[in-house]
Image (cartoon, rainbow, N blue to C red):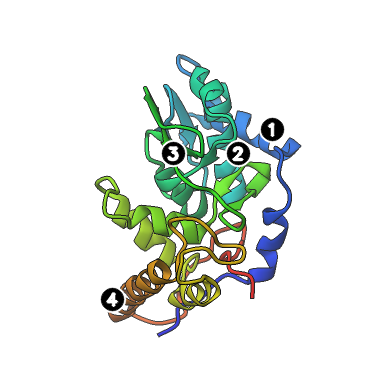
Amino acid sequence: MTRHSHATAALAPLLRDAGRSPFAFEAGNDLLVSPGASLPFYARDIPLAPIGAGFAVMLTHDMGVRERAAAAGIALERSPQAATAPGAVLADHTAAWVWCGGEPHECLIVASERHSQKHEGIHLRKITITTGDVAYPAGVPTLAPHRVFAELTRASAPKGARDFAERLVAQGWVTSSDLTRIAFRARRSGRGRGYSGPRTGRALYKRLAALAREIEERLEAHSPAAGNQRADPIGLPSLVTR
C-alpha cells in the first residue's frame, strides 16, 4: 500500500532558505508564553503546553508547520543554554511535533555535531548532520522528516519516540517509497551522494522502509475509509527529491 504523501515541490524552498525569517520572530513571540507571564484576555481559552526551559506554547487551532517551528525556535533562542549549541537543529520529538502537530514534548530536543549536553528543559544530542538532513520551516533549522523518522526508531530512542515516528507516517511526511528511494541513492558503505553519514546507509534505509511499510499496512487496516486524511494546514511535503 502507498499512503498519501505531501507534494514534494513545496518543500524545496525549505531546503535552501536558512536563517530565521521575520515571520518566525513575530509568530514565535506571539505563540510563546514566558514563565510568569499573564495571558491577554482573548487568549485565556487557548490550550497551553509546556516546552523548553519553563516556557509554554499556545496551541491555536490554525497552528501549522511554520508556526510550530517558529515557537520552538524562539523558545530555544530565549533559553540561556542556547549559547552552548551553535549550529543546533530541532530534532527527534521536537522536530516531529513541528511536522505533525499535536502536543509538543515538554523538553526541547536539539541536535548538534559538536557535543551532547542535558539542561533543564533542553536536551542536546550529538549526531552527524549532512546535506538533505535539514529543512528550514520559517527559517528555523529542523531535521527533515526522513531523518527524524530514522532518529526516533533507533534502538536507543527514548520512551514514546515510536508514537511520534508513526505520526510522521500517518500524516504522509514519511512513506515507505520515499525511504526506498533514499536507500537506492545511498551506497552500501553508508555514504551516498546527498545522504552521507553513519545513519544514512543503504542497509539502514532499507530497514526503515520495511518498518514504514508495516506502519502503513497497520494504519490502512484500521482506517475506516481511504482518502480521509487531513494534511497539515501549511500543506508542506515530504523531503525526498526525485
Q: Which residue is mark 3?
A: 126
Residue 144: name its quadrant.
Answer: bottom right
* Label 4 close to label 3 by CB (< 8 Å): no
Label 3 neighbour load within 10 Å: few <14, some 14-19, many 20+: some
Mark nearest the camera among 4 and 3 is 3
Seen as rendered, the residue at the extreme bottom is 1
**Where's the C terminus, which quadrant?**
bottom right
Q: Nearer the viewer, residue 67 or 11?
A: 11
Find numbered disc 3 in the image and state the secondary structure of the residue it sits on: strand
At a point 40% along the width and 58% down the height, the residue shown is: 150
Q: Residues within 10 Å of mark 2 (few under 14, many from 20)?
A: many
Badge 4 or badge 1: first in the primary sequence: 1
Q: CA distance from mark 1 to mark 2?
A: 8 Å
Q: Which residue is mark 1?
A: 26
Q: Amino acid at mark 1?
A: Glu
User: Of label 4 and label 3, which has the lower sequence position?
Assistant: 3
**CB within 8 Å, label 1 to label 2:** yes
Left/right placement of residue 11 relative to residue 147 reads right
Q: Residue at x 57, y 52 (%)?
A: 130
Q: Which quadrant holds the N terminus?
A: bottom left
Q: Which marked residue is nearer to the observer: mark 3 or mark 2?
A: 3
